[in-house]
Amino acid sequence: MTTTLYILIAVIIVLLAYAVVQALRLKKAVTNLTQEQFVTGYRKAQLIDVREPKEFDAGHILGARNIPSSQLRQRYKEIRPDKPVYLYCQSSARSARAAMFLKKKGYSELNQLQGGFKTWTGKIKSK
């Protein structure tokens, strides 16, 4: 019984350590911006919506390009590494993963919309 308890505690500790490391890596990779901060900078940057095409067509931030996270590995070279990148998805989970991927590929100025598109109250375009 006590061996099982020790194993369970060890697994929980490992999972917590992994979560902390991931959070720190994410914090180094991307800057979370409020909508106000996002609006001030995205017009001078590359605005990338990493949601899937159906989500993008249903409504997206005016001026955004759709490069779905599922296609990012093949299409990341469409994004210039020398210009700021503003990413968003529905809730910020996919844009965070996209930022970590781009960081590994050498991109440095990575920003994401805090809370994602679901919190966006600005202008949108839909098909």
Image (cartoon, helix red, strand yellow):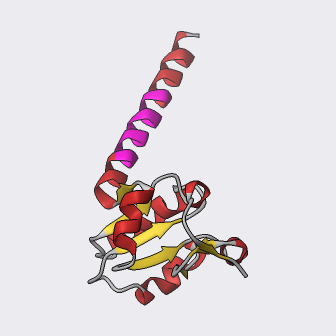
Instruction: Give the image location of residue 53, x and y in percent.
Output: 68, 78
Residue at 41% across / 88% down in the picture?
Answer: 77
112 vs 90, left or right, is left
Q: Is residue 100 visible?
A: no
- Asked if residue 20 is among those painted magenta in the image, a careful observer would answer yes
Q: Position of residue 78 (x, y in %)?
A: 44, 89
Q: Main secondary structure of the magenta part?
A: helix
* Looking at the image, residue 31 lies above or below residue 64: above
80 vs 115, nearest the viewer: 115
Q: Which residues are magenta?
A: 12-23
Using the image as rendered, state which of residue 13 and residue 87 is in the foreground: 87
Confirm whether residue 44 shows in the render: yes
Q: Nearer the viewer, residue 118 or 90?
A: 118
Which quadrant holds the C terminus?
bottom right
| Residue 43 shown left or right of residue 116 in the figure | left
Q: Residue furthest top?
A: 2
Residue 17, relative to residue 46: is it above or below? Answer: above
